Amino acid sequence: MTFFPESCRGAIFDMDGTLLDSMHIWEQVDIDFLAAHGEIFTKDYGDDLKTLDLRQSAVYTIRRFGFDLTPAQVIAEWDALALARYENDLPAKPYAAAYLQTLREQGIRLALATVAPERYYMPALERTGLLPYLDVIIGPEDFPAGKNSPELFVHTASCMDLKPEECLVYEDTLGAAETAAKGGFPVCAVYDPASGADYARMRDIFPYYLTDFHTGVQY
């Protein structure tokens, strides 16, 4: 039997970097976008984008490379490249589907709380076989503020008729994990290479951790 906290009757999963091996996608989008316009991606460009929101990134890109494009056109190209990845080739984390199945067999209710739009998450969940295991899916169409507030997690728990303390939240990023904890949720820190620098700290802060779905939750 897979370990799961006795006090919890539900699990809320993040998608990108938690259920899906997808956190590298945006660097690849940048690489493909620049290649299509005759430019080469460099580390300093990628580092510069990390401090900018989507529109600021588009404006910066236009200025840096002298593209004859509007910010809206750049964002639309980025979106099309990302959507193609979600639809066609982003994989689930190893053993993720088997892990969800095991929790379902143990009577645990399962939910997804993501900031990715439905046009991204639905094709990916269907293609990877994760969708049938999820009882509830909550995305930015439901809560545009995303994970800056615990409300996304609170609403997700309420859709399963559960209280925050009854739901274990699986998150791979420190900020989102801290937000869930502020809402009264027990948190499981999930390892992902993209946020690996924070993983040791997350393991110190939160009661549970998961290095991979084959090993499962540890504490």
Image (cartoon, rainbow, N blue to C red):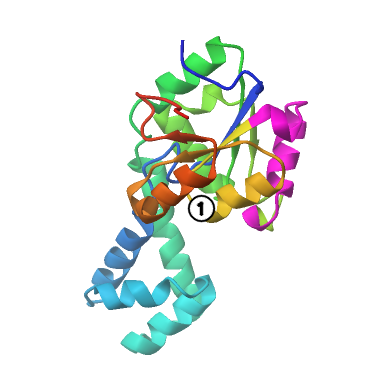
Percent coordinates x, y for residue 38 in the rendering: 22, 77
**Would residue 153 be counted in the magenta stretch?**
yes
Q: Which residue is mark 1?
A: 174
Q: Quadrant of residue 29?
A: bottom left
Q: Which residues are magenta?
A: 147-167
Q: Which type of secondary structure does the marked residue at label 1 adopt? A: helix
Percent coordinates x, y for residue 22 in the rendering: 38, 47
Give above or below for 107 relative to 41: above
Q: Is residue 157 left or right of residue 194?
A: right
Q: Is residue 193 left or right of residue 103?
A: left
Magenta span main SS: helix
- The residue lying at 48 percent from left, 51 percent from top is 173
Percent coordinates x, y for residue 121 in the rendering: 51, 42
Q: Is residue 166 left or right of residue 202?
A: right
- The residue lying at 49 percent from left, 18 percent from top is 3
Nearest to the observer: residue 151 or residue 71 = 151
User: Tag 1: residue type?
Assistant: Leu
Q: Residue furthest front?
A: 204
**Would residue 216 be counted in the magenta stretch?**
no
Give above or below for 67 relative to 129: below
Q: Quadrant of residue 33?
A: bottom left
- The residue lying at 72 percent from left, 35 percent from top is 164
- The residue lying at 47 percent from left, 47 percent from top is 202
Q: From where the camera sits, is residue 115 visible?
A: no
Give above or below for 73 relative to 78: below
Percent coordinates x, y for residue 141 in the rendering: 68, 50
Other residues around mark 1 within 10 Å, as few (<14) / some (14–19) / many (≥20): some
